[in-house]
Image (spheres, rainbow, N blue to C red):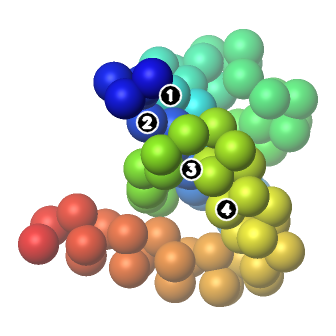
Amino acid sequence: MANAKPWFLYLIECTDGSVYTGITVDVEARYAAHVNGKGARYTRSHPPLRLLGSEPHADRSAASQAEYQVKKLSPAEKRALAARLSLAKEN
């Protein structure tokens, strides 16, 4: 399993200002599903505005653990995390 696909933690800003957190192996496809109303129940009632950021994890377990930790954060803390992810991606 050395060539296993990484899992990603991702954050989406919703139109009401809330921040949705999820995990997937394909961020672009999963975001498209949310936009098209085929994602999570939460994003069907809180439509996505934009993808805030994502970060890779070695496997589903690691991504799930990171998701659990992020979901405990306040919306402001989630936005700060997304900003750090964006900066790291640029460098």
Indicate which disc residue 66 carries. 4
**Pointer 3 or 4: first along the chain:** 3
The label nearer to you, 3 versus 4, is 4
Q: Which residue is mark 1?
A: 25
- Asked if the residue at tag 2 contacts the one at tag 1, i.e. Cβ–Cβ closer than 8 Å, the answer is yes
The residues tagged by marks 1 and 4 sit, at their Cα atoms, a distance apart of: 14 Å
The CA span between labels 1 and 2 is 6 Å
Per the model, the C-alpha gap separating discs 2 and 3 is 10 Å
Q: Tell me which amino acid carries mark 1.
A: Val
Q: Is residue 81 left or right of residue 23?
A: left
Say which label, 4 or 2, has the lower sequence index.
2
Q: Which residue is mark 3?
A: 9
- Say which element carries label 1: loop
Q: Amino acid at mark 2?
A: Pro
Mark 3 near mark 4, Cβ–Cβ under 8 Å? yes
Q: Secondary structure at mark 2?
A: loop
Measure how far apart labels 3 and 4 are at the Cα level: 7 Å
